[in-house]
Amino acid sequence: MKLEKLINASMKTGLTGLEWAAGIPGTMGGAVRGNIEAFGSSISQLVKKVQVFDAKKEEIKIFNNKDCEFKYKNSIFKQNPNLIILSVEIKLKKCEKEKIKKRICDNLNYRAKNHPLNFPSAGCVFKNYESKIASHELVKQFPELKEFNKKKIIPAGWLIEKCGLKGSKVGGAEISQKHANFIINSGQAKANDVLELIKIIKKKVIGKFKIKLEEEIQYLGF
Ligand SMILES: Cc1cc2nc3c(=O)[nH]c(=O)nc-3n(C[C@H](O)[C@H](O)[C@H](O)COP(=O)(O)OP(=O)(O)OC[C@H]3O[C@@H](n4cnc5c(N)ncnc54)[C@H](O)[C@@H]3O)c2cc1C
């Protein structure tokens, strides 16, 4: 089922819990597999049970939340492509419809303002860096690192932006001016243009912050 359809249905029936996911494209199966997250919430916090077809053993299984081995942007399903998600049971709470609608609208407006939605993209290219930056010199140069260090999450988009890469182009691919973790197709971008930009980003971020960025996107056919 499309995530958007589920969010609309939850709004219409007065069930809260999914508003943060408004605007994330894809299906519920893909969302659980990739453990989607936004605004500090993740799908793993809602999942009770997942019905799965194990294509290796040719049997249907039920996974409880713990069995799903959810981690940041990861799950047992991502690690095992033989596990095909058939259905998902999630836990939502009753709430006034108007409140749910407002939260959905706020989140959609935030995305429209801060993400380059008017160009094709694959969403965020890199995972956020889940640790601290210890270098006193860097913390002095970038005071916002103190807050990131407290949460032990350094946003990949921030790292890329601080390398001065916003707006960098290779062929038709461009690092978005709006959000540096998005590579947009501003024209006739080829896969190689995007790969070249990814290489440039990784090299610059290692050079400046000694951080090896890891892709959130997955490559097909390479
Ligand atoms: C503009 C934009 C904004 C985004 N914002 C966010 C965000 O804020 N937070 C976030 O976490 N992500 C975000 N994403 C990423 C996006 O949510 C994922 O691309 C999406 O969750 C993938 O789901 P899908 O159904 O489209 O899967 P697909 O892209 O079709 O497939 C992805 C993988 O999942 C597998 N898969 C799909 N369905 C199943 C299933 N039922 N069982 C097992 N495996 C399955 C496929 O085989 C494939 O390997 C964004 C993407 C875009 C383009």
Image (cartoon, rainbow, N blue to C red):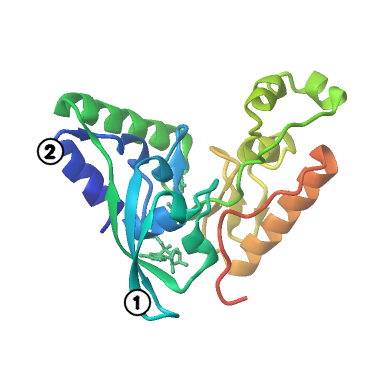
Identify residue type, mark 2.
Answer: Thr
* Residue 48 locus on image (x, y percent): 33, 47
Q: Residue drawn at (38%, 69%), measured in percent from left and top?
A: 84
Residue 3 shown left or right of residue 221 in the figure: left
Where residue 163 sits in the image (x, y, percent)? Answer: 75, 38
Task: Please state the quadrant of the image where ligand 1 appears.
Answer: bottom left
Quarter of the rendering occupied by the C terminus: bottom right
Disc 1 residue crowd, few under 14, some 14–19, many 20+, Cα 10 Å: few
* Res. 134 mark: none
- Which x, y percent locates residue 134? 81, 29
Q: Looking at the image, is 211 positioned above or below residue 52?
A: above
Farthest residue, direction left: 13
Question: Which residue is found at the position 57% from the left and 44% from the top?
Answer: 176
**Is disc 1 placed on a helix, strand or loop?**
strand
Which picture quadrant has residue 137? top right
Relative to residue 125, is residue 80 depicted above or below?
below
Q: Earlier in the sequence, mark 1 or mark 2?
A: 2
- Tag 1 residue: 59
User: Is residue 27 among the parts visible in the rendering?
Assistant: no
- Measure how far apart labels 1 and 2 are at the Cα level: 34 Å
Q: In what element is the residue under mark 2?
A: loop
Select label 1 or label 2 by which is in front.
Answer: 1
Residue at the spot of label 2: 13
Specify few, some or many for label 2: CA neighbours under 10 Å numbering under 14, 14-19, or 20 or more: few
Question: Where does residue 205 sit, x and y in percent of width and height?
Answer: 76, 44
Q: Which quadrant is the N terminus positioned in? A: bottom left
Left/right placement of residue 85 relative to residue 143 reads left
